[in-house]
Image: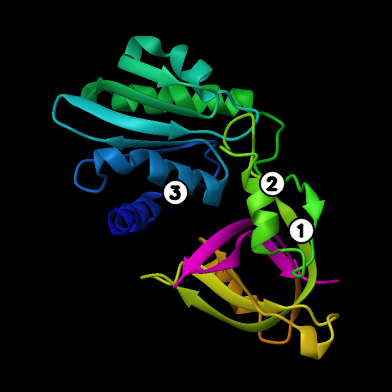
């Protein structure tokens, strides 16, 4: 499933031409597995920060998924075009739909006009709401377990996002079949050397940021906490949302 998602995502990116487009609408017959259209749409939405529709194109009836950004109610917009669909459901940020394949060009034309009007004057730059500043010393399994008691996370109960400041890069490299992701090893130079602990971090679809970084750089990053269990040992991994060189 992960391999198929990455393949579909790579194919989708090749089709993306986002210049001046308020939304991305991708329809393809061989490129997208029906069960993965939502995952691909979600990843494209995160990377390009605009509404995305990914459609598995078939001869007569096509099916797809939509993902949207904060402030743009995608199900409301799609329902205003309901005559184009044979089936439609979802909520403000995500939808699934079915339509006659011959209606796809009309969907694209009308949707782009509607989204452009709704987003007029708004910036298509993602803003990350940070919940709390955290140190590496605080990012331990016990803290993660306490946070996890607030789950399940989702719409209306977002997973907490933390900022970590002035961390030192011990090592970094691109990972993934196409080097799309960034893996880092970090520590806190303010901690006494004998007490210093290294932390792992992974930035999905942040591989391009490696070009501006090198070991020993100090960075600030925003991340969720995740837990990795290996041979019975629990370890916290930072799932990076964004990062920058420390000021």
- The residue lying toward the viewer, choosing from 11 and 103, is 11
> Quadrant of the rendered structure where residue 61 is?
top left
Where is mark 2, residue-wise?
160
**Badge 2: residue crowd in 10 Å (few <14, some 14–19, many ≥20):** some
Q: Secondary structure at mark 2?
A: loop
Q: Residue furthest top?
A: 83
- Mark 3 or mark 2: name the one nearer the start of the chain: 3
Whether residue 243 can be seen here: yes
Task: Report the mark closest to the observer, 3 or 2.
Answer: 2
Q: Residue at x 59, y 39 (%)?
A: 151
Q: Residue at x 86, y 80 (%)?
A: 190
Residue placed most toward the observer, 136 or 112: 136
Highlighted range, magenta: 220-247
- Residue that label 3 marks: 17
The question of residue 243 being in magenta is answered with yes
* Circle number at residue 163: 1
Q: Residue at x 49, y 76 (%)?
A: 174
Q: Is residue 121 magenta?
A: no
Q: Is residue 137 above or below residue 83?
A: below
The label nearer to you, 1 versus 2, is 2
Label 3 and label 2: CA atoms lie apart by 33 Å
Q: Position of residue 232 (x, y in %)?
A: 47, 69
Residue 103, percent from left and from top? 28, 21
On the image, the x and y values in percent for residue 132 come to 80, 51
Can residue 223 be seen in the rendering of this structure?
A: no
Q: Nearer the viewer, residue 13 or 198?
A: 198
Vertical arrangement, residue 206 with respect to residue 161, above or below = below
């Amino acid at each position: 499933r992960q391999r198929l998602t990455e393949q579909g995502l790579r194919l989708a990116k090749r089709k993306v031409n986002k210049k001046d487009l308020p939304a991305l609408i991708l329809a393809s017959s061989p490129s997208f597995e029906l069960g993965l259209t939502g995952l691909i749409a979600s990843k494209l939405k995160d990377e390009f920060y605009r509404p995305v529709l990914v459609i598995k194109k078939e001869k007569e009836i096509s099916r797809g998924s939509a993902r949207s950004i904060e402030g743009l109610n995608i199900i409301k917009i799609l329902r205003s075009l309901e005559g184009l669909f044979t089936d439609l459901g979802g909520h403000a940020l995500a939808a699934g739909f079915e339509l006659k394949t011959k209606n796809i060009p009309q969907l694209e034309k009308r949707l782009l006009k509607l989204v452009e009007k709704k987003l007029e004057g708004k910036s298509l730059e993602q803003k990350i709401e940070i919940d709390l500043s955290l140190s590496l010393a605080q990012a331990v399994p016990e803290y993660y377990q306490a946070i996890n008691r607030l789950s399940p996370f989702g719409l209306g109960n977002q997973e907490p996002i933390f900022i970590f400041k002035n961390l030192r890069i011990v090592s970094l490299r691109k990972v993934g079949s196409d080097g799309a992701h960034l893996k880092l090893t970090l520590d806190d130079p303010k901690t006494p050397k004998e007490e210093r602990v290294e932390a792992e971090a992974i930035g999905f679809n942040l591989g391009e940021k490696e070009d501006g970084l090198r070991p020993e750089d100090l960075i600030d990053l925003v991340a969720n906490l995740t837990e990795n269990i290996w041979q019975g040992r629990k370890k916290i991994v930072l799932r990076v949302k964004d990062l920058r060189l420390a000021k």
